[in-house]
Structures are given as structure tokens and as C-alpha cells.
Amino acid sequence: MRVARSTWALLVLLAVAGCMPQAASVAPIMATPWTTLDGERRTIGSMMGDKATVFITLDPECPICELYAQAFQVMADAYAAQGVAVIGVYSGPFMERRKAQAYSGQAGFAFPQVMDSICTITMALHARVTPECFVVSPAGKVVYNGAFDDRPVRQGRKKLDAHVPHLAHALDAFLASGQPQPEVVAVGCIVECEE
């Protein structure tokens, strides 16, 4: 009993001291203006959906992003009528705009995409790999992060067909009850951000 109280006291002190990890949220940066891949200046908040927003970290040179290129737009189209928006995020100082534009054009992306060269959005989401999907509430809180589906097994190994559409399950659960499974680890290419 005494150990449990000591543990709770320590956790409270750490939380008060700011040593606990912050929950993933884009709320602090929703009013920040960004330049989209199309050259338009918009805030994150103005690009978000009424019911939910899916952020997807993207890298034109990542084979797993290539695997999903058309699937991302199909998903965006399927959920648009339900008040869900999609925002693509090209993370890191090494990401080239022209390569991102070529990838976007070949994939036929109609959703907004931003260059996050200093990883502000990436760090707010706690993104680790590309592609990684994040379901975000209208208030900016990340309610799901992880895999699009179960096709990638590990780097260099994938299934021919997906059996579990993780992102679709998370979106459906969030739209129905607000309670999706919070995380399914995504397999992908490492996000290269300087800290």
C-alpha cells in the first residue's frame, strides 16, 4: 500500500514537473499558416474536417508510400461526405518539393499537402515513419495513430493483400463512438527530422 502511494506521488510530481510525455495534438499549431504543395497559404485548422481529419506522413522515395499512393485518395474520397478531411505531410529538411509534387501528381492526390521541413507538424503528431496515419478530432487531439492496413509486415516484406483495414476501422469507430483503438504500429520508412 505504501509503495503504491509512493509510486503515485512520484508520477504526480513528474507530471507537474513536465517530465511526462505530452499527448499528441495539433491544437497548438492549428492557427499556424502553411504553404500547401499547390502554393496556397492556409492554416491547419482551415484544412481540417468537421468530424475528423486524417494526417498522413508521406515520402515520395519510400516504397511503402508508393504502395499506398492510390489507396490514400480512394480513402479520402470515401470519407469526405462524412466530414473527414485528409492532409498529407512531407516531413523533414531533406524532402524536396519537386519530388513531392511529382509523387502527388502521379498518385492523383486532391487533398491538401504541406511541406513540413522543420518537422513542426510531425513532432506534434509524434510521427515516426512514412506512411503513418493519424486520426485527429476537430479539437486537434490525436485519437489514432498507426498503420493504414496490415499489408506491410516489416521493412522489405509485405502481404499481397490487406486483411485488416486499420485506418478505416479507426475512422469508423471514431465517427460512431469517438473511441477507436488508439494505435496500431505502422511499418514504414523512418521520418528524418532533426531535433
Image (cartoon, rainbow, N blue to C red):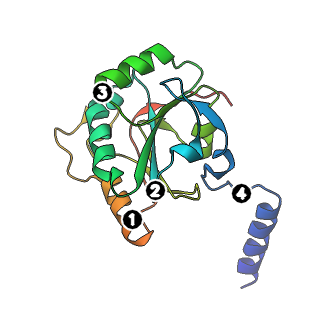
Binning the other alpha carbons within 10 Å of mark 1 as few (below 14), some (14 to 19) or many (20 upward) gives: some
Image quadrant for the N terminus?
A: bottom right
Instruction: Identify the mark nearer the N-term, 2 or 3.
Output: 2
Per the model, the C-alpha gap separating discs 1 and 4 is 29 Å
Residue at the disc numbered 4: 20
Q: Secondary structure at mark 4?
A: loop
- Residues tagged 4 and 2 counted as in contact (Cβ below 8 A): no
Binning the other alpha carbons within 10 Å of mark 4 as few (below 14), some (14 to 19) or many (20 upward) gives: few
Q: Any mark on residue 67, and which?
A: none
Instruction: Identify the mark nearer the N-term, 1 or 4.
Output: 4
Residue at the disc numbered 1: 175
- Above or below, 50 against 39 in this view is below
Type of the residue with mark 3:
Ala
Q: Secondary structure at mark 2?
A: strand
Binning the other alpha carbons within 10 Å of mark 3 as few (below 14), some (14 to 19) or many (20 upward) gives: some
Camera sees residue 134: no
Query: Which numbered disc, 3 or 4, marks the residue closer to the eye?
Result: 3
| Number of marks drawn | 4
Type of the residue with mark 2:
Ala
Residue at the disc numbered 3: 107
Binning the other alpha carbons within 10 Å of mark 2 as few (below 14), some (14 to 19) or many (20 upward) gives: many
- Above or below, 39 against 129 in this view is above
Instruction: Identify the mark nearer the N-term, 4 or 2.
Output: 4
Q: Position of residue 69 (x, y in %)?
A: 30, 31
Q: Secondary structure at mark 3?
A: helix
Type of the residue with mark 1:
Leu
Residue at the disc numbered 2: 52
Type of the residue with mark 4:
Met
